[in-house]
Image (tube, rainbow, N blue to C red):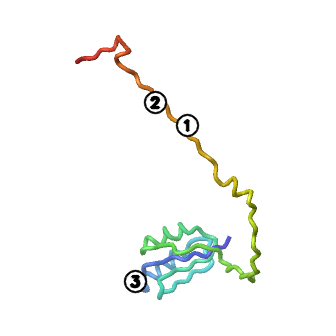
Amino acid sequence: MMQKIIVSLDLHDDRCKQKAMKSVSGISGVDSVSIDMKEKKLTVIGDVDAILIVSKLRRHCHTTIVSIGSAKEPEKKKEEPKKEAISPIVDLAYAYRGYNPHMNTHYYHSVEENRNACVIC
């Protein structure tokens, strides 16, 4: 399954950019890699684990996952007029169910009842 992974990077110069590109492009399953230096974001498209990408990039710079989604952008469907759904009233009658919790019973042992017990006063 092709994924589009967008990662935010803390890049300072072109050398950091080259290191990031080299480390990500070496991972198997990566189809394309692009970096936007203005927004400091790296976009990876391919069948690869996002955690693997982040762990490789954190060796060079601070990395944060922005989004993970499918590589294909979903087609927008035409909006159909919404029909008013009438919910049955019967469901409302069963919405609340009474709850009767079991009362806990606590037992205690009195010393006075046990004559063999030793009490030092």
Residue at 40 percent of width and 83 percent of height: 12
- Secondary element under disc 3, as helix, strand or loop, is loop
**Circle nearer the N terminus (1, 3):** 3
Residue at 70 percent of width and 54 percent of height: 93
Determine whether 85 is above or below 79 in the image: above
Residue 69 location, x and y as percent? 62, 74
Marks 2/3: CA–CA distance:
67 Å
Taking 62 as reference, is 69 left or right? Answer: right
Taking 112 as reference, is 23 left or right? Answer: right
Kindly check if marks 1 and 3 are in contact, taking CB atoms under 8 A apart as contact: no
Taking 77 as reference, is 69 left or right? Answer: left
- Residue at the extreme top of the image, as rendered: 116
- Secondary element under disc 1, as helix, strand or loop, is loop
Q: Residues within 10 Å of mark 3 (few under 14, many from 20)?
A: few
Determine whether 104 is above or below 97 in the image: above
Marks 1/3: CA–CA distance:
63 Å
Residue corresponding to mark 1: 102
- The residue mark sitting in front, 2 or 3, is 2
Q: Residues within 10 Å of mark 2 (few under 14, many from 20)?
A: few
Q: Amino acid at mark 2?
A: His
Q: Which mark is residue 12?
A: 3
Kindly check if marks 2 and 1 are in contact, taking CB atoms under 8 A apart as contact: no
Residue 42 location, x and y as percent? 52, 80
Q: Which mark is residue 106?
A: 2
> Is the N terminus in the top left, top right, bottom left or bottom right quadrant?
bottom right
**Circle nearer the N terminus (2, 3):** 3
Residue 9 location, x and y as percent? 46, 78
Q: Amino acid at mark 1?
A: His
Q: Amino acid at mark 3?
A: His
